[in-house]
Structure formats: C-alpha cells, structure tokens
C-alpha cells in the first residue's frame, strides 16, 4: 500500500488570488472563538489546515495529453479518517479546497460524526469531457491519492460534492479496491457509492432531506418564529431554491411534499418562478428532457436567474456554490430565513447586513450535514459488511405481530390485514438511515439552540453552531493533555 508520508504544498500559483470563501470561514471561526475561553494555541491548532496535497497529472484527452490540476486537503486529524467530498469545477483552487475541508471538520463535530474534515477538488468543467474522459481523470486522481496515502477507509474517505455523484464514487472505489486487494474494508474508502457497489440506501437524497429536517425544526420552534414574526409550520411558507442539483432538488422536493410552496428555482442559465407553486418533480422531468429548467410550462422563466434571490419569499435555500450572497445583494434579500444548502453561500461581509435586517441564517455546517451523517452510516455498513436491518427486520415483524395478536385477544377487536401490515412492519435499511438522519438533525438543532438561547454573547445561529463544534474538537485535544 502507499507510503504514510504526507506532503504539503503551498505555491502562490495554486491560488486564484483573494478567496472570500476561506476568509469567511476563518472570520466566522474567529468570531465564535473570541467569545470562548479556550487558549490561543488550542484555537490555532483547531483552525489550521493539517495537510494539503497538490498534484498535476497527465490524462489522454481527445487524442492529446492534458495536464490536470487537483487537490486533497485534510483539515483536521483530531479524529480519523478525515472525510469530505470531491468537487469538479473550474473554481477549484487550494484555498477553496482548504475552506471546504475546514467546514467539514466543524460540520462533523456539530453533528457528532467521528471524523476529521477533508475535501478534494479537480479543476475541470465536467461538462467539457466525455464520460470516458471523466472516468480516466477520476481513476488517475484516485491513484495519485493512493500513492500519497490521502485515501483509505481509516485514513481519508471522499464523497460526492459539486459536479460529482455516485458514478464518480464507483470509479474511485473500484480503483482503490484494485490496488488494495488485501484490504477487506476497501469499499469503505469512499462514500456516496451506488447501492450495488456498497452504497447505502438514502445517501443520494440525504443532504436535501437533512436540510428539510433542519428547516422543519426551525419553523416549529415557537420562540424562534415569534422572534422572526412568523407563524409556526411549513404550510404557509414560500421558498426559493438556488441550484437544482443534488442538494437543491431534494431539499425543494421534501419541502414541497410537506406543505411549503416552492415559488422560485434558480439555475446558472436562468430561473423559473410561480407564486402559486412549482411542481418540483415535473420541473425535474423537464430539465432531464431539455437540459435546462428554463422554458418549463408550469412557471415563468426569468433570464437573469440570480435576480430571483431578491424576490419575495419566507425561506431562501442557496444550494449551488459559495459566495452567492455578498455585500452587493445582501441588503436586497427579502427572505426571513436563509437555510444554507451550499457550503459558504454567504460571505462574511454579507452576513452582518442580513443579521441587522433580522434574517435568521441557518448555517451550512449544520443545515447541509445530512450528507456526511449518512456517509458515516455507509462507512459503518462497509466496515460491518452487513446491510442495516438484515439481522432484525423479520425478528421485529414477528415480535410486532405477537404483540398485535395479544392485544386483539385481550380487547376482542381485530385489525384489518392492511392495518396489521403497517403496525407489524420491521424497519429496512432506508427506514433506519432516514431515522438516524432525522434523530441527528433534531438533536444537533437543540444543542446549537442551547448556545443560541443560553449565551447572551451569541447573537446568531452560525456563531452558536461554531461554539458547539469548537468545544467538541477542543475536548478531543484537551483529553490528550498537550494543552494547558
Ligand atoms: P450538484 O452539482 O449536484 O448541483 C449544483 C447545481 O447548481 C447544478 O444544477 C448547477 O447547474 C447549479 N448551479 C451552478 N452555478 C449556479 C449558479 N450560479 N446559480 C444557480 N445554480 C447554479 O452539486 P450539489 O452536490 O447539489 O452541491 C451543491 C452545494 O451543496 C455545494 O456547495 C456543495 O459543496 C454543497 N453540499 C453538497 C453535499 C452533497 O451531499 N452533495 C453535501 C453538503 C454540501
């Protein structure tokens, strides 16, 4: 297997220059750290990126050779493996990857997933390549990670992110397995895989579903809704979603199915709006057929998509890319709640403008954590080599049936076959995954809100989430006894 050496690289040429995303993540960290009592050295260690691997490799593309630039950052080794997605986009540079890796550290801590944070990226526009070329790039990237020990079930476990999905994860798993043939746990080297290749049911929808659970908790929080001068519940809420990809589509779908009205969806090439509500599934069918959400018959198309961020709504879900809400448009946002589906969609310059207007910003590190929560379940499944529910589903059904029969005997009343089937049913893998996700999102909401309501110095939910996260990471280091 590959060497255990970690290489660090940091030439200025690797950066696109001023990076508001990394600056924002660090500014948010500093804001929370300033009101905590931890020693400076400990906070510096938590904030620092532990290792970054920058690579360039040749790939045969359209008859020639193209040199591809790629990164993998492991932000924190306080828990292993490190965990975080792989992004394919032209925006990828070292600072973006480091910002995303740092967010992963804080995110894992906030939802009690026992991983350090990591993130990878390849600077390509995936739309510019054929499937075969993307496969070649992905497999070569995986080999580079293996060579430097930046991947493995106990080392660093990637997952999908912007521009990647189950297909890329399947290529990564296959390449890793081929090169680590004695590793019985090799499939745990990456998550977000197709179910047929060691994936877990519920992973694809997990981030959007988790976002829905987070928003549902907030709108059912009577104290919070009173503060925002809003009614509780989802049924009267108007929602705009930016980005109709994995996160945005699933978030919109679950919010719509539970009563919210999706009044706008924004994509890179335009937006669609309908004050009466957009049928998210029909829009998805249209997009799959036409390659764009624009021109959808069930809504009006707006050419300048990003202008729709400023339309009237209760809840805005930015679920595309970072730095979409900046000091230039923050003052014009009408939403009362912003649920960050994307990582870093609000710059640290924009956030004070929003907070001053009384907007509730639900932070990315909590709101979009559903993906990593279910990735954790997938990793556990890979290490245990058994599908969740396989051992107990039928046993539970038998036990439930015996309880029903006993109650029927005692009461003299009988259930219909349909009622009996509903009550007796044992949980399958997807039920267990979704239940574990729901429980995690609810528990984390209440832990964050204890800081939000309980600490007079905390004025916003992001700072509350950072404090919850930093405290947990600090405990890991303090238990080593290396900080006074
Ligand atoms: P994706 O590639 O599936 O979807 C992104 C969508 O955004 C695409 O449909 C794309 O066309 C659209 N888009 C691009 N630029 C846009 C613009 N300027 N305006 C509007 N739409 C635009 O990616 P994803 O996995 O849904 O990730 C989206 C965001 O969520 C990223 O910030 C990612 O880091 C974050 N995230 C993803 C996951 C996950 O499980 N996939 C988990 C946590 C966080």
Image: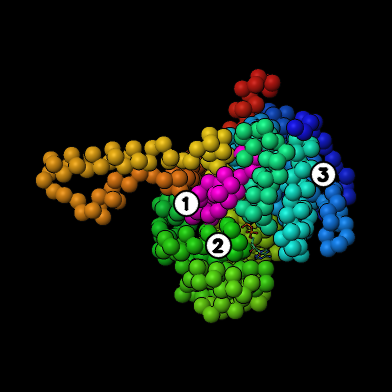
Residue at point 79%, 31% (across, down):
3
User: Relative to 344, does residue 26 appear above or below in the rendering?
Assistant: above
x, y percent for residue 296: 56, 77
Quarter of the picture holding the C terminus:
top right
x, y percent for residue 425: 33, 47
x, y percent for residue 179: 73, 38
CB contact under 8 Å: marks 3 and 1? no
* Residues in magenta, as a range: 188-215
Residue at point 69%, 21% (across, down):
482
Badge 3 crowding class, 10 Å Cα cut-off, few under 14, some 14 to 19, many 20 or more, is many
| Pair 1/2: label in front | 2
Q: Which residue is mark 3?
A: 54
Q: CA distance from mark 2 to mark 3?
A: 32 Å
Badge 2 crowding class, 10 Å Cα cut-off, few under 14, some 14 to 19, many 20 or more, is many
User: Relative to 312, does residue 344 appear above or below in the rendering?
Assistant: above
Horizontal arrangement in the rendering, residue 394 relative to residue 114 (left or right)? left
Q: CA distance from mark 3 to mark 1?
A: 37 Å
Element under disc 3: strand
Q: CA distance from mark 1 to mark 2?
A: 15 Å
Badge 1 crowding class, 10 Å Cα cut-off, few under 14, some 14 to 19, many 20 or more, is many
Element under disc 1: helix
Q: Which residue is mark 1?
A: 213
| Pair 3/1: label in front | 3
Q: Which residue is mark 2?
A: 249
Q: Is residue 85 magenta?
A: no
Element under disc 2: helix
Horizontal arrangement in the rendering, residue 136 relative to residue 285 (left or right)? right
């Amino acid at each position: 297997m590959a060497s255990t050496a970690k290489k660090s690289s940091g030439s200025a040429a690797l950066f696109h220059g001023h990076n508001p995303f990394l600056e924002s993540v660090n500014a948010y960290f500093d804001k929370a750290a300033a009101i905590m009592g931890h020693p400076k050295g400990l906070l510096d260690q938590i904030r620092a990126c532990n290792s970054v691997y920058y690579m360039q490799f040749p790939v045969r593309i359209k008859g020639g050779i193209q040199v591809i630039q790629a990164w993998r950052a492991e932000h924190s080794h306080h828990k292993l493996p490190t965990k975080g997605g792989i992004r394919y986009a032209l925006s990828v540079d070292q600072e973006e990857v480091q910002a995303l890796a740092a967010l992963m550290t804080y995110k894992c801590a906030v939802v009690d997933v026992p991983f350090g944070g990591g993130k990878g990226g390849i600077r390509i526009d995936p739309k510019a390549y054929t499937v075969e070329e993307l496969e070649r790039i992905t497999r070569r990237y995986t080999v580079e990670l293996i060579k430097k020990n930046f991947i493995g079930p106990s080392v660093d476990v990637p997952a999908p992110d912007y521009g990647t999905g189950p297909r890329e994860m399947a290529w990564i798993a296959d390449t890793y397995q081929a090169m680590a043939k004695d590793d019985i746990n090799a499939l745990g080297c990456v998550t977000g895989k197709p179910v047929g290749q060691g994936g877990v049911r519920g992973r694809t929808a997990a981030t959007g579903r988790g976002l829905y659970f987070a928003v549902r908790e907030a709108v059912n929080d009577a104290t919070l809704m009173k503060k925002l001068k809003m009614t509780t519940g989802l049924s009267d809420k108007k929602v705009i979603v930016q980005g109709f990809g994995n996160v945005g589509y699933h978030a919109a779908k679950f919010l719509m199915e539970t009563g919210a009205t999706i009044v706008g969806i924004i994509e890179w090439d335009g937006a669609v709006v309908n004050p009466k509500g957009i049928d998210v599934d029909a829009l998805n069918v249209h997009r799959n057929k036409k390659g764009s959400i624009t021109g959808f018959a069930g809504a009006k198309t707006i050419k300048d998509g990003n202008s729709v961020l400023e339309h009237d709504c209760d809840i805005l879900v930015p679920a595309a890319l970072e730095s979409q809400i900046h000091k230039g448009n923050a003052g014009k946002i009408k939403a009362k709640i912003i649920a960050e589906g994307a990582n870093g969609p609000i710059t640290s310059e924009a956030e004070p403008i929003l907070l001053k207007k009384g907007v509730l910003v639900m932070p990315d590190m909590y709101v979009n954590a559903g993906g990593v929560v279910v990735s954790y379940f997938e990793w556990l499944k890979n290490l245990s080599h058994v599908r969740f529910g396989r051992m107990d589903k039928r046993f539970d059904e038998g036990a439930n049936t015996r309880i029903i029969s006993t109650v029927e005997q005692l009461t003299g009343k009988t259930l219909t076959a349909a009622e009996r089937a509903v009550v007796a049913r044992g949980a399958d893998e997807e039920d267990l995954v979704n239940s574990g996700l729901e429980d995690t999102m609810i528990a984390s909401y209440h832990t964050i809100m204890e800081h939000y309501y309980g600490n007079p110095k905390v004025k916003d939910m992001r700072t509350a989430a950072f404090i919850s996260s930093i405290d947990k990471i600090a405990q890991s280091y303090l238990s080593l006894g290396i900080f006074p």
